[in-house]
Amino acid sequence: MKKILITGALGQIGSELTEKLRSTHGEDNIIASDIRRPENPSGIFEEVDVTREKEIYEIAKKYNVDTIIHLAALLSAKAEAFPKVAWEINMGGLVNALEAAKELNLKFFTPSSIGAFGPSTPKNNTPQDTLQRPTTMYGVNKVAGELLCDYYYSRFRVDTRGVRFPGLISYVTAPGGGTTDYAVEVYYEAVRNRVYTSYIAKGTHMDIMYMPDALDAIIQLMEADPAKLKHRNAFNITAMSAAPEHFTAAIRKHLPDFKMDYQVDPVRQGIAESWPDRINTDAAREEWGFEPVYDMDGMTSDMLEKVREKLK
Ligand code: NAD
């Protein structure tokens, strides 16, 4: 990866990945793009709507990039509210990005999600290769996307790579309408008001990971020796399985008067219940050395410190 085009670069992942790659690869080698313009522009930015057939191709060609990191998407909760728009962005955008990679012979990364699993998937220690019958539009998009990326590799030899991200926790950019957004909001409300009302019910486990581990995983996989990759796309990765009460316990170590209330949102609760409790990450560990650093306590200390600074 020398010159990289990022789509959806203003989102939760893209905003931090862009900065990290600019610091390691040089300002001029990272082309950030999104359908909206940045509030505080810095570095090279291009307005790209991934659903327009040739826009990704044209910008990739203009800057002579060797890699596309495709992050533009509509996330799980939003996709349930606007399923047809989700199909157009998540599938239409992906095929346009893959076509650009094929035409220009580029390396390609895109994330799938734990949302690619469904109620009939084994819930605990969910294997890398298993039953995937998701019941959400987002999940349908993610399974189809995983298959499409495998297809572009086997049929056209496009160097496609990807992971199944769990819910990502971060403080730089607000999450974009996923089911695990509660796990970010909780830190802001803990610092502001010492109380958080969770829309996810007590006892509901989902996989999560702190953003620095997610960014390292993308870079590590993209730099991995292709000869060692038996899977290429959709590697299961996670750092921990957590339910709302685990956040309460970890936050109380810093803010003893913190309280969690519950007002369950049936839509997002339904999505959460259709997902695994804890996925198995052996393939990612064995094939490219995935090794997350942050656990619940490490993540919580860092999040509380950074959120406090942000809210000052
Ligand atoms: P996000 O919602 O924060 O950001 C998505 C970005 O895409 C936004 O900046 C949005 O403006 C842009 N976008 C939307 N429609 C577009 C279009 N037509 N053309 C160009 N840009 C468009 O999402 P994120 O959390 O950064 O997620 C990035 C990827 O990672 C997605 O594929 C998502 O499914 C996946 N993922 C994220 C998480 C998570 O917890 N954040 C978990 C699993 C998988």
Image (tube, rainbow, N blue to C red):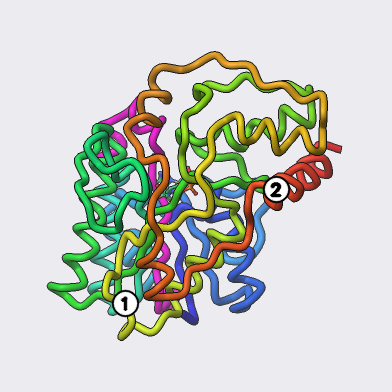
Give the residue displayed 66% in from the left and 31% down from the top: 186
Which residue is painted at 63% across and 47% down in the image?
A: 170
In the foreground, 239 or 176: 239
Q: Mark 2 points at which residue?
A: 297
Q: Which amino acid does label 1 sit on?
A: Leu
Crowding near the residue tagged with mark 2, few <14, some 14–19, many ≥20 C-alpha atoms within 10 Å? some
Q: Give the range drawn in magenta.
A: 62-87
> Which of the 4 image quadrants contains residue 192?
top right
Q: Is residue 11 visible?
A: no
In screen coordinates, is 169 left or right of 201? right
Position of residue 288 measured from the top left corner of the image (x, y, whole percent): 42, 75
Query: Residue 123 appears in which quarter of the rendering?
Result: top left
> Residue at left 30%, top 85%?
227
Picture coordinates of residue 252, whole percent (x, y): 77, 32
Q: Tell me which corner region of the image, top left, top right, bottom left or bottom right, holds residue 230.
A: bottom left
Q: Residue furthest left?
A: 155
Q: Are marks 1 and 2 in contact (CB under 8 Å)?
A: no
For mark 2, give the secondary structure: helix
Side of 10 relative to 307 (left or right) = left
Nearer to us: label 1 or label 2: 2
Mark 1 or mark 2: which comes first in sequence? 1
Quadrant showing the C terminus: top right
The one nearer the camera, 83 or 262, is: 262
Q: Residues within 10 Å of mark 1 (few under 14, many from 20)?
A: some
Q: Mark 1 points at which residue?
A: 229
- Residue 225, image x and y in percent? 38, 84
Is residue 74 magenta-colored? yes
Q: Is residue 219 above or below residue 209?
A: below
Which amino acid type is marked by label 2?
Asp
